[in-house]
Image: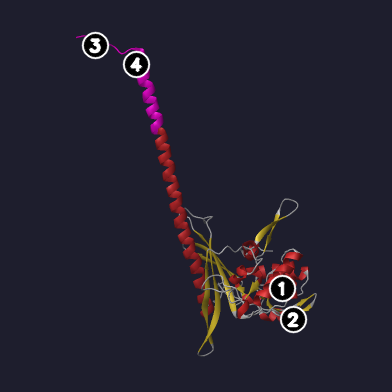
Amino acid sequence: MSTRRCPKAQRGAALITVLWLTAALAVIGVSLARAVREDLRRSENLLEGTQASLLAAAGIERTLFFFDYPPVSLPGVPAVYTPGQPRMVYRFPGGEVKVDVLGESGKLDVNTAPPEQLRSVFLAAGIAPDRAQALVTAIVDWRRPQPAATLLPLASTFWVRRSSLEQIEELLLIPGVTADLYYGYRDPLADGGSVERPGLRDLLSVRGATAVFDINSAHPAVLAAAGLGAGDIQWIVNRRRQSPFLPQEVQELMLSTGPASRVLRAGLDGAYLIRSTARPARPGGGLSDYRRTAAALVTFETLPGNRQRPVIQQWYELASWAEEADRP
């Protein structure tokens, strides 16, 4: 029995079929590899995000421990924390954490500040005059107690509060206060660049001050509203980035407007915002570009023996505060 050889056309069709199958398998393989890589990236992001969140919380917890039990300085060993220090850098095995300790007396008291002081700080923060005046009018109107008969219900159970603010986040309920105004924003310039504008939460507080402000944490706009000149403000900002002002230094400090102790102070505050920004370590060395921020509003409870114990009043997760180095 004789065997017949396949014609050239059949051999060509078989070759084309094999090539198409090979191409299809290659596409499937590339798609599978891409899906695996994306899953790996998502897993890495989830892992780094979890590590960063835990590191940020650890930074706050360590700072609270230093508040409760100040470290003992040893000869030849640099102190990790000294009272009044505005920033600490902790290096944990899992990554690096930068912690900013911002005294609430470095902000203006939103409930008691007079209208002209509110307007001054808004103008110094770069808010347009007409918008600044509208904000002042809205805040003053909001914090003025209203008769119960004039309150309009938001729903069947909740009523609009028209009195002093208990938490700074209540500013978002006031007409005219947008998310950009509250959290801060980038203002475009005519030359194509932009400038970082502070948010109202960086300038105002329900535990703030109106006469004497914390020199180590007050925003330049608050210092300007307190009556300091541009040269003095720039010098204070540059100086406190190197080391915190001590109480005795403020007492002896002379500014162009006179003694700094008139409007500035340094020392134990009644409330602090502890802001912790963490970057996890990579397995191969170095730090990840992934950042996670947490913050805690801390006050102090007096214990027997006149001992002060820090108490967390409010906790913020994934806070979007800019780092102090990025501020003006």
Nearer-N-terminus badge (1/3): 3
Q: Looking at the picture, tell me which residue is in the foreground, 304 or 287.
A: 304
Asked whether disc 2 touches disc 1, contact meaning CB atoms under 8 Å apart, the reply is no
Give the color scheme: rainbow, by chain, secondary structure or one colour.
secondary structure
Nearer-N-terminus badge (2/1): 1
- Per the image, the residue denoted by label 3 is 3
Q: Distance of mark 2 from mark 1, alpha carbons?
A: 19 Å
Nearer-N-terminus badge (4/3): 3
Image location of residue 280, percent across then percent down: 49, 59
Q: Distance of mark 1 from mark 4, alpha carbons?
A: 88 Å
Q: How many residues crowd around disc 2 within 10 Å: few (fewer than 14), some, or many (20 or more)?
A: some
Amino acid under disc 2: Arg
Q: Give the farthest residue toward the top.
A: 2
Q: Distance of mark 4 from mark 3, alpha carbons?
A: 16 Å
Amino acid under disc 3: Thr
Callout in the foreground (3, 2): 3
Nearer-N-terminus badge (4/2): 4
Label 3's element?
Answer: loop
Residue lying at 72% horizontally and 50% vertically, measured from the top left: 192
The label on residue 118 is 1
Amino acid under disc 4: Gln
Position above or below: 190 against 223: above
Amino acid under disc 1: Leu
The label on residue 69 is none
Q: Looking at the picture, tell me which residue is in the foreground, 150 or 112.
A: 150
Q: Distance of mark 1 from mark 3, alpha carbons?
A: 101 Å
Range shown magenta = 1-25
- Per the image, the residue denoted by label 4 is 10
